[in-house]
Image (tube, helix red, strand yellow):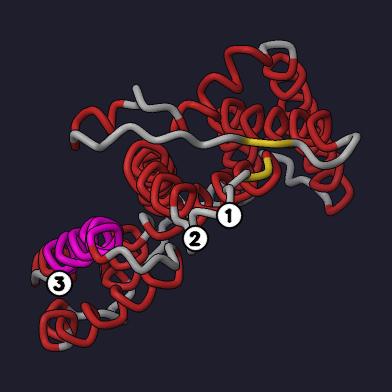
Amino acid sequence: MEEQMTFWDHLDVLRGSIIRVLVAGVAMGLAVFFLKDHLFELVLWPRENDFPTYRLLGAEPFQLKLVNTELTEQFMIHMKVSLVVGLLVASPYIIYVLFRFISPALYDNERRASYRLVGAAYGMFLVGILVNYFLIFPLTVRFLGTYSVSSEVETMLTLSSYVDTLLLMSLVFGIVFEIPVIAWLLARFGMLKHTWMAEYRRHAIVAILIAAAIITPTADVMTLLVVSLPIWLLYEISIWIVRFTNTPQTIKECSEQSEPSLPPSSSQE
């Protein structure tokens, strides 16, 4: 007979999982903290003329100076960036620990679907961060950092503004790139049809342009189009994914999987 865990047993397991997550995040954050030179070479690289995106597009050389305005600003930014990057590096282990805590409550079919869902969501989040770092953020920095209303005004961007913008845009694009995963999930539950998405494609394009204008509030039409293009491609990919998910065979498989088999932790003699 398999013994079921009590409520307090579950709390003990949850506490252990949270402690392991915190230890992993802090440990990786400390490791990244002591790699300051390499860390900020990557963080500050998009402001340099030799950044791959600028060389690929043949952009004209520009100069962007960063300044520090507060006594503790550089140290606090160093800690913030180290913690964020440390959590990102430790995220595979963190996801593993959290999923290991949740998975015993899932049926076999739910567990298999969760593997695909979590893996796809994590992968798309990383792709969104990379697209922002190598494409969206450099173009935004170059335009806003060199924009001037008068030759009498010298642009000196603060380090805090630069880093906060990079982290915020990375988070935003990481979430934006979850569109195909969310579309697949809604289609699995029968809440989204590819015909609806195709019918409202023009409305979606307008919404994408508005969202791109909010994400990168610049007057540069080229930057707006560059930001809008990946989001539009994600929408088109989502239509294809939803169309495949809405096939009769897939719908039949989903309905069969919705009927649970034996619970994974049921007590049987």
Residue 19 magenta-highlighted? no
Percent of width and height locating residue 220: 31, 63
Q: How far apart are marks 1 and 2 (CA)?
A: 6 Å
Inspect this view and state whether residue 108 appears: no
- Locate residue 94 relative to residue 31 in the image: left or right: left
Categorize mark 3 by other alpha carbons within 10 Å: few (<14), some (14-19), many (20+). many
Percent of width and height locating residue 142: 40, 45
Residue 71 location, quadrant: top right
Q: What residue type is labelled 3?
A: Asn
Categorize mark 1 by other alpha carbons within 10 Å: few (<14), some (14-19), many (20+). few
Inspect this view and state whether residue 210 appears: yes
Quarter of the picture holding the C terminus:
top right
- Locate residue 23 relative to residue 192 in the image: left or right: right
Which label sits in the foreground, 2 or 3? 2
Give the residues drawn in magenta, as a range: 222-242
Q: Which amino acid does label 1 sit on?
A: Val
What residue did someone put label 1 on? Answer: 153
Q: In this view, does 184 lie above or below 196?
A: above
Asked if labels 2 and 1 touch by Cβ distance under 8 angstroms, the answer is yes
- Locate residue 2 relative to residue 20 in the image: left or right: left
Q: Is residue 60 above or below residue 176?
A: above
- Front residue (pair 250, 236): 236
What residue did someone put label 2 on? Answer: 150
What residue did someone put label 3 on? Answer: 246
Q: At 79% from the left edge and 31% from the top edge, which residue is drawn?
A: 74
Percent of width and height locating residue 116: 34, 45
Which label sits in the foreground, 1 or 3? 1
- Front residue (pair 115, 66): 66
